[in-house]
Amino acid sequence: MDIRQMKYFIAIAEEGQITAAANRLRMAQPPLSQQLKAMETELGLLLAERKGKSLELTDAGRKLYQHALKITDAMEEAVLEVKETGSGKKGKLSIGVNTLSNYDLPRLLKTFQKRYPGVSYKIQQNESTQLCKLLKERVIDLAIVRLPLELDEFDAISLKPEPFYFVTADSSLIMSSSVAFEELTDIPLIIPSTEGLGLYNKISFAFTSRGLSPDIMCECSDISILFDLVSSKFGSTIVPETAVRLNSLKDLHVYLVEDTEELGESGVIFIKNHYLPKTAQNFLELVQEG
């Protein structure tokens, strides 16, 4: 028996007549009678007995009716769920995030959750190069990374750049509300990345492009350890606004670093010319709304 026959039998059971059931199903009476007979032949059981002009279900017919209701309801629910998944109303959004991802992600996800409450989430944190690998392996759908990045195999949507801040525990270094790179050249710095990676290169270039030589005395890619080191006066640091917003910097002095917009560029990347789940497509639409 197939789902079509289940629907036929439900109509027969509920209408109690072949004629009425055929009218409900908008089909001719003879084919419906044939379908009932075919089901009885397949099962080797009588499903309905004629009582005058009406049909009365047998015990086997009543049991089949109960199962038919469950099966058709489950099928309709499955079709609806698949359609909702195809529209992005359900499903999973898989996002990779860089160690210091754009601080706007929580706001974006909160807005997305309100629009698509049926969606679940998988968020993985890693370095940009590893996130690119996960994208290629289809482990994640999207990744938020620091730019620029080698993007030959990826498309990217830029996010709003964020400024960088100078953070120190040394009270002798108290300055005005903002500070220029020229004022930071002789200060021992802990860089929130390791040599050869995005933030390290960006911060180093910010100095060298101005003809300056930074005093980089430590590299630390773990942001919580980095701030512990700063708190102990082991050194000072330059970090993106994300790090300032997402961490408690009690007893630390925080100053805006001037002209750092070019350092704070990040973007959402995804594989070129590959199918994206509708949940990911909907998230990209939200990102482009700004």
Image: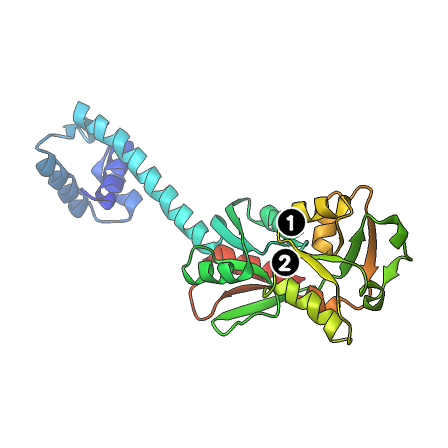
Residue at 62% in and 67% down: 147
| Residue 25 rendering spot, x and y as whole percentages | 28, 45
Give the mark nearer the N terminus: 1 vs 2. Answer: 1
Circle 1: is it few (<14), some (14-19), or many (20+) Cα within 10 Å?
few
Residue at 65% in and 63% down: 200
Can you tell which mark lies on residue 145? none
73 left or right, relative to 189: left
Front one among 285 and 50: 285
Front position among marks 1 and 2: 2
Helix, strand or loop status at disc 2: loop
Helix, strand or loop status at disc 1: helix
Circle 2: is it few (<14), some (14-19), or many (20+) Cα within 10 Å?
many
Quadrant in which residue 251 is drawn: top right
| Figure label count | 2
Confirm whether residue 65 shows in the render: yes
> Which residue is labeled 1 in the image?
106
Quadrant in which residue 166 is drawn: bottom right
| Residue 92 rendering spot, x and y as whole percentages | 47, 49
Query: What is the three-letter code of the residue carrying label 2?
Result: Ser
Front one among 57 and 243: 243
Can you tell which mark lies on residue 193? 2
**Quarter occupied by the N terminus:** top left
Coloring basis for residues? rainbow
Give the vertical position of 31 relative to 18 (above or below).
below
**Distance (Cα) linking label 1 and label 2:** 22 Å
| Residue 218 rendering spot, x and y as whole percentages | 68, 56
Give the vertical position of 95 relative to 4 (above or below).
below
**Quarter occupied by the C terminus:** bottom right
Front one among 17 and 188: 188
| Residue 202 rendering spot, x and y as whole percentages | 67, 67
Residue at 71% in and 44% down: 228
Query: What is the three-letter code of the residue carrying label 1?
Result: Pro
